[in-house]
Amino acid sequence: MRYLARLRAFGFIAQFVVLDVALRGMSCLGHPWASLVHQGQSLLLWSVVWALRGRRGARVVAALAAASILAVQLTFRRYYHGNIDAQVLRSAVMCWSDVWPVVVRALPQALWIAVPVAIVQYLMLAPSGGNAGRLPLISAGVLVLSVALAGPVGQGPPDLQLIEALRILWQKPVQTHVARVEVPPLISSRPRLPNILLVISESVRASDFCSAPVGDCPVAPASRPAELDRPASAFADREGMS
């Protein structure tokens, strides 16, 4: 029984760190120290929640919170191959009239994920006896200290990315007034004007665009340099052109 209790504790506390590593692989260690700090913050956060699971109401709230984060992030990742962070939520709020129909269509799928996951989360949080003692206070203190020293957690696991993004909802929108900008015409000195095709698109992740010569490109196979008969260097600066 003690072994099962420890297994449940590990599964609940480390679920988002395990999910982050499973989804992003070794790319989540692009900045090793920062990644380790953020993953440690996720472990501290959910260890506090685990230690405070004594009452049924606390278990229900914790199970619903964890299940909601998993359902939202997994549903979003299915379509956009990333996690909801502050930038994504800020953009969604700015264009809410366009985003709301998409949210309505994705809501049933998110609920199909959230309901069974919430049940599993609640079962994992079942009391196993013992007294947490000062563990919640120690974990919470270390968590607050790490956030104060390490700064924003937007590059952390999916749970921290979504939790940090929620602050956008309470921020006052910034009102920007841009004056009219007039650009003088650029006169060409050539007797014959060049024939230039300028393609403008939204920013695309490198992993999806497949600018490097890779064998498999499931998201956008037609964008591979080999398919377009163009060198890979021709696509290297697409982010700047976007």
Image (cartoon, rainbow, N blue to C red):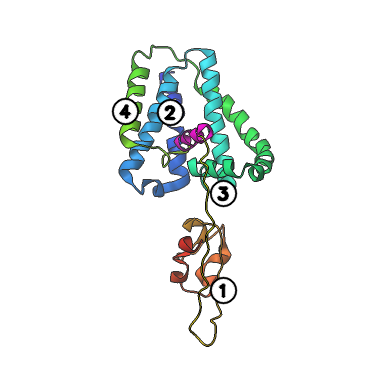
Secondary structure beneath label 2: helix
Q: Are the two marked residues, 4 and 2, in contact with CB atoms closer than 8 angstroms? A: no
Instruction: Kindly identify the residue that appears in the image at 66 percent across and 37 percent down.
Output: 107
Work out whether residue 178 or residue 192 is closer to the camera in this orientation and state it: 178
Residue assigned mark 4 = 145
**Kind of residue at badge 2:** Ile
Instruction: Kindly identify the residue that appears in the image at 35 percent across and 36 percent down.
Output: 151
As measured in the structure, the alpha-carbon distance from the residue carrying label 4 to the one carrying label 2 is: 19 Å
Instruction: Kindly identify the residue that appears in the image at 43 percent across and 26 percent down.
Output: 46
Q: Which residues are magenta?
A: 159-171
Secondary structure beneath label 1: loop
Indicate which disc residue 2 carries: none
Q: Are the two marked residues, 2 and 3, in contact with CB atoms closer than 8 angstroms? A: no
Residue assigned mark 2 = 13
Which tag, 1 or 4, sits closer to the chain's start?
Answer: 4
Image depth: mark 4 or mark 2 in front: 4
Measured as percent of width and height from the top left, residue 139 is found at 35, 23
Mark 3 Cα-neighbour bin, 10 Å: few <14, some 14–19, many ≥20: few
